[in-house]
Structures are given as structure tokens and as C-alpha cells.
Image: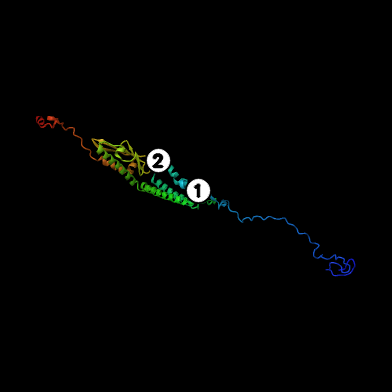
Amino acid sequence: MICPKCKRKYEDDMPKCLWCDAPNPNYGAEDTPENETEPEIKPEIKAETPKPETEPAKGHLHHNSKEPGLKIFWLALLLGFTGLHCTNSGRTLRGALYLVFGGLFYKMVYLIFQHNGIAIPAAVCAVAFACSAVIVFLFLKDLWKISLGKYRNRKTGKKYESKSWMPALALIFTISHVVMLNYNGYTTYEIVWNNGERVTAKMKLAVEDYMLAQKNYFEQSGKIGDVKEIRYMSGFVKWNGQFLYRMDGKGLEVTYMSNYHCPYNTIWQILPVIHNGTLDWEINLPENSRCNEFAHQLVSLKESLSNVPKESEPAASTPELDKGVDGVGVVPDTTQQEKNK
């Protein structure tokens, strides 16, 4: 390095001249390059939330959401066969199927037939029972899912919360429905496949019980008794299977309360009458031949009563007794009159 002041040479890395103490103009120039610029200040960029690779489908936006299950539990418990619990949870089609095949459609057909006095065919009865049994099984299954917290709508993804007491109530309800289903199945079997043999046989036994009670009262009092006097039943009306028994005056009226094989509200009458001091019976049968085929036991009972020989009345030619001494009757002697002829 040559000093610009004294023109003498000294080392380049020295801060000043050794001879005249003039500052070295090139000292430290290497540390700071000429083309060096101030660092560029970039604006701060806020970190964005990473987006998922694939967005969930619209139908599963609430997949993990939970809804209170108390409402649909009571709907399933009390009105499960109507499908209201399905409709309330968004399963409209399933609820409509429950409503139709759970008994509403069949009930409408039954009422139409009943109003027009038409007996329901056995095939309709069998199909109705099968549909009702399937719907009962399905809504009981829904009830258990709700009580265990496993009931959900796959389309919306909604799940329903359960309570600790729900399974116990669902168990009691299930047992009662199984018992009712067995009873309805037995009744359907008796009416459809067994032609109501046991049902009508019970009706005949009820009629015979009435006739026996009336006969016992007649032997004691010599007259026909009413419902309280003969003690046939506790009230004026009683049920026995598919029949309604009512004391009409002092007679018995049997009404058919179903609609299979025989029209609804068909009536049989059993009337007690006193004939020549003895108790006799009149059985009025319906005009419908199918009803008489159905309740053939009462037809046989009427025929057996009509074949009982009546006590013979006094002959018109029997001579009257003549009053004898002290009013004692004496048969007149007619032999002398025949000789004179």
C-alpha cells in the first residue's frame, strides 16, 4: 500500500501509515463489499389451516353428531307400528311402510268389509297377520337399538343417545308384545286354518251354560229368570273368544264380533218359553248360510231340541168325569148306550 500523503509504501492490512500516521483508505473495504445491499424485509405471511385432501360428502356432515333419544324412544314404545319414530329420525320411507303394513291398511279393509256386511276371506287374514308380525319384529328391533344407543340414520349420520333405564322398559314391552303376538297367531290359526271349530265350540258351551242356569231356576221357582236371578254372568254383557253375550230380556243374544267366515254383528238368539208347564227353547239362527256352517254346533243343538218329544195333550174325545157322591169323579158307563144303539 502506498500512502497518499507521504508516498511511502507499507502493508495493506495496516490501519494507518507507519511514517506519517495517515489513515489507510482501503482498510476494512474487503469486509464490506460495494455491491452489498440491505436485506429485503418480506411481509409476514399468516399460516393457513391445511385443507383436507377430500371433503366429506354432504350426507355425512353430521356423522359424529348425537341427538337426544328420549322422544323417538317413546314414539317407538307407544306407536312403533305406525313408524312415527322412523319418520321423526328422517327415515320417511321406512316409516311409511310401517304405517301401511303395520295394520292401518288392513284395518281400513276390515272396516270397509264390516260396514258392508262382507266376511273377510281367509287369505286376507293370513296375509294381514304375516305383515303385522314382520312389522312388530322390526319396530321391536328399532326399540332395542334406541335403548342401547345404537340407533342412527345412515343418510344424515345422526345418532341418538340412550338412557340407563331404557333397556329394562324395552324388555317388559317386548315380552308383552310376544305374548300378544302368540295370542293373535293362535286366534288366526283357529279362525283361518281350523275354520273356527274351537271358537264356535266355546260358544255352544256358553249357550248350554245359560240353558242349564235357566232350567235350574225354573225348577226352583216355576218361572223364567233374568240375568240376576239365574246368576248366569256377573253383568249384563260378557265376552268369550270372538262372541259377545248379552241378556236380552230373559233370553240370551249372542253377537259375532269378528268378520271371518261370517259377517260382523251376526246374531243368534236363545229364547226360553213355557209350554204346558214345562220349559222349552227357541233358537233363532241367522239367514246367512255361511254363518250356520261356521257355527254348526248351534244348528245341531236346535235340531236336537226340535226332536225331543213333547208331552201329549189330553185327547179331545176323553169323556169328562161325572160328579159323584161328595164330588168324587166317576167315569160314566157307556156300555149300555152302545147296546141300545
Q: Position of residue 149 (x, y in %)?
A: 50, 52
> Which callout, 2 or 1, points to the residue nearer the camera?
1
Position of 210 relative to 25 (above/below): above
Name the residue located 43 percent from the left edge and 43 percent from the top edge: 107
Measuring 43% from the left and 48% from the top, which residue is drawn there?
132
Look at the picture and state if 40 lies above or below 218.
below
Left or right of residue 94, residue 317 in this image = left
Which is nearer the eye, 82 or 150? 150
Q: Residues within 10 Å of mark 1 (few under 14, many from 20)?
A: some
Residue 315, horizontal then vertical, whole percent: 18, 34
Look at the numbered disc 2 and give the secondary structure of its residue: helix
Q: Is residue 64 left or right of residue 327?
A: right
Q: Amino acid at mark 2?
A: Gln
Residue type at mark 1: give it: Leu
Find out whether the residues at labels 2 and 1 contact each other: C-beta distance under 8 Å: no
- Residue indicated by mark 1: 70
Return the disc, 2 or 1, that comes first in the chain's sequence: 1
Relative to the observer, which residue lies in front, 164 or 254? 164
Q: Quadrant of the N terminus?
A: bottom right
Q: Residue 10: which numbered mark, if any? A: none
Q: Is residue 288 above or below residue 185?
A: above
For the C terminus, the quadrant is top left
Instruction: Identify the image quadrant of residue 297.
Output: top left
Q: Which residue is mark 2?
A: 114
